[in-house]
Image (spheres, rainbow, N blue to C red):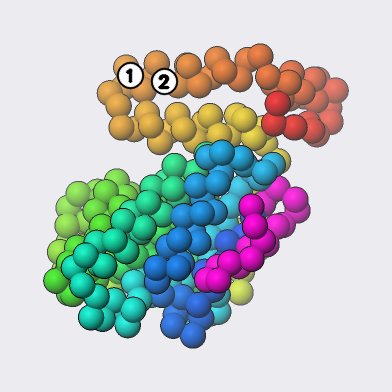
């Protein structure tokens, strides 16, 4: 993976954690075509090579915004064809985040509106600053969420709440998002990254193959019947039995030491 991008900043933490910072602070980290391409490239790469990463944290640059949504200045005057072409990039970006085999955590440091809310909702779970606000405001512009918003929000907060939020376009607080199930934890702004990195480090210390298989089992299983989900789960489980990490985990427990997992 290349190290530098135009609209996002990448940084490794403790070797196994990658922070992805949406980095257009002059426009509240608004999602433009290039940011869609940059995020798509990063997350699609993980389907081919995880580069020994065990957790990814997505956050926004600055203190006021995670991502304010689509860049409407860029979109102003777009032809219908250009709009659709841009949105294909955003769709592919969202699918890449959702399909990432590595756990993806959102650290929402400020406003997460429109496409920004959709990026956060596409992550595996969300920690948020208590000053953060969320909204899916697309209907106020004559469009609708199209990067997973109607699906991921409804799965997090339920159908009736999702309809209320999406059909009205009303913003909501981090505290409300936590009480409804969209956000996992709300903290003070100055504690956000450390709190998110603390849980990322705990995930990264576990068996990476086990974590990836468990993630897939949860995500895919919820889209199946219970009996099919149980069958998928045991198939994922059985793939771990012959791994070196499974042997290391049991050996470390019996030897009363921390396991050293190598992802093999």
| Figure quadrant of residue 231 | top left
Q: Residue 232, which numbered label? A: 2
Instruction: Indicate the position of residue 26 as horizontal and vertical percent values.
Output: 49, 85
Which residue is at 23% across, 80% downward?
77
Label 2 and label 1: CA atoms lie apart by: 6 Å
Q: Residue at x 35, y 71 (%)?
A: 69
Q: Residues within 10 Å of mark 2 (few under 14, many from 20)?
A: some
- Confirm or deny contact between disc 2 and disc 1 (CB under 8 A): yes
The image position of residue 235, as x and y in percent, is 48, 16
**Residue shown at the point (49%, 35%) measured from the top left:** 215
Residue 199 at x, y percent in the picture = 62, 51
- Does residue 242 lie above or below 198 as drawn? above
**Quick check: 110 left or right of 177?**
right
Say which residue appears at 44% left-offset and 48% top-offset. 96
Q: Is residue 52 above or below residue 27?
A: above
Residue 153 visible in rendering: no
Asked which secondary structure carries label 2, the reply is: helix
Q: Which residues are magenta?
A: 1-17
Q: Is residue 179 left or right of residue 207?
A: left
Q: Quadrant of residue 102?
A: top right
SS for callout 1: helix
Report if residue 54 lies within the magenta region: no
Residue 243 position (above or below residue 143): above
3 is within the stretch colored magenta: yes
Of residues 199 and 115, the one nearer the viewer is 115
Q: Is residue 83 left or right of residue 217?
A: left
- Which mark identifies residue 228? 1
Q: Give 93 or 212, whichever is nearer the viewer.
A: 93
Instruction: Give percent across and percent down for residue 151.
Output: 27, 49
Residue 241 in view, yes or no = yes
Furthest-bottom residue in view? 26
């Amino acid at each position: 993976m290349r190290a530098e991008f135009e609209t996002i900043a990448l940084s490794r933490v403790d070797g196994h954690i990658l922070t992805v910072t949406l980095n257009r602070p002059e426009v509240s980290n608004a999602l433009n075509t290039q940011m869609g391409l940059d995020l798509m490239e990063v997350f699609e790469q993980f389907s081919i090579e995880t580069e020994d990463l065990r957790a990814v944290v997505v956050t926004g640059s600055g203190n006021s915004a995670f991502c304010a949504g689509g860049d409407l200045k860029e979109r102003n005057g777009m032809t219908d064809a250009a709009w659709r072409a841009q949105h294909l990039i955003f769709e592919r970006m969202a699918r890449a985040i959702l399909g990432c085999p590595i756990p993806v955590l959102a650290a929402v440091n400020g406003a997460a509106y429109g496409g920004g809310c959709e990026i956060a909702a596409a992550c595996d779970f969300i920690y948020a600053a208590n000053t953060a606000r969320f909204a899916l405001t697309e209907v106020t512009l004559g469009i609708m969420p199209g990067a997973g918003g109607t699906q991921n929000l409804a799965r997090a907060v339920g159908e009736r709440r999702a309809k209320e939020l999406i059909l009205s376009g009303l913003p909501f607080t981090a505290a409300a998002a936590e009480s409804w199930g969209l956000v996992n934890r709300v903290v003070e702004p100055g504690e956000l990254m450390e709190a998110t990195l603390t849980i990322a480090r705990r995930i990264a210390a576990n068996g990476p193959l086990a974590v990836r298989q468990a993630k897939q089992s949860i995500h895919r299983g919820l889209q199946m019947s219970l009996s099919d989900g149980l069958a998928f789960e045991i198939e994922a489980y059985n793939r771990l039995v012959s791994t070196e990490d499974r042997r290391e985990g049991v050996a470390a427990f019996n030897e009363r030491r921390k396991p050293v997992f190598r992802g093999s």
